[in-house]
């Protein structure tokens, strides 16, 4: 197994989503490859840090204007592509994870609040349909302490995931509290219910989503857990720590990502012990073997499997890049339709699995809304877009003596370094013009330095441009991207932090090496597939 294949599987390995054969292959590779072993250790440490830091994030008044993707990569021996799909998925997930329990319906927030209400209503309706069909259970289990009542409203489980809807009611004030999911919830004997792969830090909790609630002091949320091992389980759950969900209107001046949130606006935490025994019944997903072939823009695609479960739909497909002169980044499947119902690509799930193979083929798995209740005999798969990585090298010398603002051109577009502050953590602000005819979308670049190993932190802002050439602030339209026709993301600002590994001295980058850029092509091709 090659290193680049192993790296594609890091997260699935950590989540325990690999079968025994694949897991053994990875562990054998780790044993003989110190480089991959080190990267895995760094990734575990980074995720642990992010989990801890995530709980300290407060939501400023202009939060949606500051949603950015922060990527930390090792620049010592390799370069990484900044992919637009990863940017959008990460920022969108961040948006809902930390979006407040009480929306502010004024100014620019009005339409966003409407979107959030509609999204939460659809979640409620989907869960109601699952329960009505006997595929989930309404529980309404309650526990109360310190005038705070937690209600486990309902649960649904299948071969893909376990979902728990819950409420937290604060009976003595207007503050809203959510479960501090990184360390506020524990499961007794979790090795009985999940494949923990001998990982002492394993947690079955995959994500938490905030849902709209207009009731004072009442928070509504959704926990997504890994699928349980057995057909049934009685989960012994203890909730020991809650965290206040801040209203963005309470943050004065909307502290941004550069300066951090206002220190006076820290979220309160509430300790306690709310115990539940949650009965879970896992329902079988329906798997359809497909083996349907298609060709799009010279790319061979094979749709291999469609998995339809009560909580989600997964499409597994392979593709081979046959388009010379372009490096295929990814293929976006826009939707899967059955009986007139269109299951769109999951905004907060996206591609759930990606693997490269030695023979030039890649395998991906995309998630969509559930089609389980449709019981389809055929589906329409809509291929939305393809992103390519175009190679076009350019090196720009930097150093300590450059005069600001420092501008250069790439693909006929002006790029300007507005800020460059040297130190142990060197900070840079780089901005790109966005003209109507800009050729590239996002840059693939790295920094060069003679000073050895160093890390790079990047936060990217930009705009969506639709098929008519209209520009939309990406942060404002992140959760409402479906309202735009054929949107393409263009980066316009990079907030960069560079730091030498293990050193506390001034770090000076020697150059920026641009390797190329991304280019998106919309396809909008439908393929009808009969299910066996």
Image (spheres, helix red, strand yellow):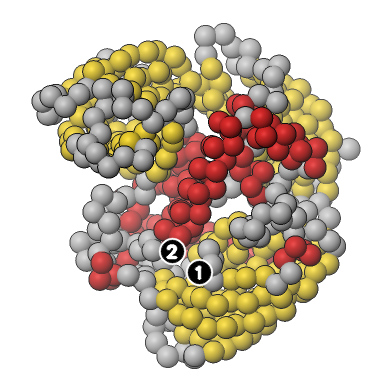
Circle on res. 55: 2
| Horizontal relation, residue 241 to residue 32: left or right | left
Q: Residues within 10 Å of mark 2 (few under 14, many from 20)?
A: some
| Horizontal relation, residue 345 to residue 51: left or right | right
Compared to residue 512, the image places residue 285 above or below, namely: below
Circle on res. 180: 1
Residue at image location 50% in from the left, 42% down from the top: 42
Circle on res. 279: none
x and y, in percent, of residue 109 in the image: 34, 59
x and y, in percent, of residue 358 in the image: 69, 19
Q: Residues within 10 Å of mark 1 (few under 14, many from 20)?
A: many
Compared to residue 69, the image places residue 6 above or below, namely: above
* Badge 1 or badge 2: first in the primary sequence: 2
x and y, in percent, of residue 103 in the image: 39, 67
Residue 30 figure quarter: top right
Compared to residue 338, the image places residue 121 above or below, namely: below
Residue at image location 64% in from the left, 82% down from the top: 275
CB within 8 Å, label 1 to label 2 = yes
Residue 303 figure quarter: top right
| Callout 1 secondary element | loop
């Amino acid at each position: 197994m090659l290193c680049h294949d192993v790296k594609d599987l890091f997260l699935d390995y950590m989540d325990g989503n690999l079968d025994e054969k694949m897991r053994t292959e990875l562990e054998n590779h780790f044993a003989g490859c110190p480089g991959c072993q080190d990267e895995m250790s760094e990734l575990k440490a980074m995720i642990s840090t992010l989990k801890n830091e995530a709980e300290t994030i407060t939501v400023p008044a202009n939060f949606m204007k500051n949603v950015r993707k922060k990527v930390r990569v090792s620049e010592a021996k390799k370069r990484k592509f900044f992919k637009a799909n990863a940017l959008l998925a990460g920022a969108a997930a961040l948006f809902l994870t930390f979006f407040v329990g009480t929306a502010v319906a004024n100014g620019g927030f009005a339409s966003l609040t409407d979107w959030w209400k509609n999204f939460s209503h659809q979640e409620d309706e989907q869960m109601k349909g699952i329960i009505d069909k006997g595929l989930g259970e309404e529980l309404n289990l309650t526990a109360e302490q310190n005038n705070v009542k937690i209600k486990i409203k309902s649960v649904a489980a299948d071969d893909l995931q376990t979902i728990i809807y819950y409420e937290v009611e604060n009976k003595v004030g207007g503050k809203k509290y959510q479960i501090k999911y990184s360390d506020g919830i524990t499961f007794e004997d979790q090795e009985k219910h999940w494949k923990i792969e001998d990982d002492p830090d394993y947690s079955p909790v995959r994500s938490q989503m905030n849902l709209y609630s207009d009731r004072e002091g009442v928070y509504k949320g959704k926990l997504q857990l890994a699928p349980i091992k057995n057909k049934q389980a009685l989960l012994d759950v203890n909730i020991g720590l809650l965290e206040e969900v801040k209203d963005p209107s309470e943050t004065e001046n909307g502290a941004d990502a550069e300066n951090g949130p206002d220190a006076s606006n820290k979220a309160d935490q509430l300790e306690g012990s709310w115990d539940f025994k949650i009965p879970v019944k896992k329902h079988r997903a329906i798997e359809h073997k497909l083996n349907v072939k298609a060709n799009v823009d010279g790319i061979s695609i094979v749709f291999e499997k469609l998995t339809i479960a009560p909580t989600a739909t997964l499409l597994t497909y392979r593709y081979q890049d046959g388009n010379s002169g372009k490096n295929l980044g990814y293929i976006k499947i826009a939707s899967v339709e059955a009986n007139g119902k269109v299951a769109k690509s999951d905004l907060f799930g996206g591609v759930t699995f990606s693997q490269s193979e030695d023979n030039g083929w890649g395998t991906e798995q995309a998630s969509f809304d559930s089609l389980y209740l449709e019981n389809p005999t055929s589906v329409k798969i809509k291929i939305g877009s393809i992103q390519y990585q175009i190679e076009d090298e350019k090196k720009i010398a930097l150093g300590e003596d450059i005069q600001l603002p420092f501008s250069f051109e790439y693909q006929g577009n002006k790029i300007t370094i507005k800020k460059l502050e040297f130190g142990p953590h060197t900070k840079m602000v780089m901005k790109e013009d966005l003209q109507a005819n800009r050729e590239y979308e996002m840059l693939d670049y790295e920094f060069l330095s003679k000073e050895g190993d160093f890390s790079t932190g990047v936060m990217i802002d930009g705009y969506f441009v639709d098929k008519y050439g209209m520009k939309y602030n990406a942060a404002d339209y992140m959760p409402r991207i479906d309202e735009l026709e054929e949107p393409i993301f263009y980066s316009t600002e990079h907030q960069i932090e560079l730091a030498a590994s293990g050193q506390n001295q001034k770090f000076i980058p020697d150059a920026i090496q641009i390797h190329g850029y991304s280019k998106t092509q919309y396809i909008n091709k439908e393929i009808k597939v009969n299910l066996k």
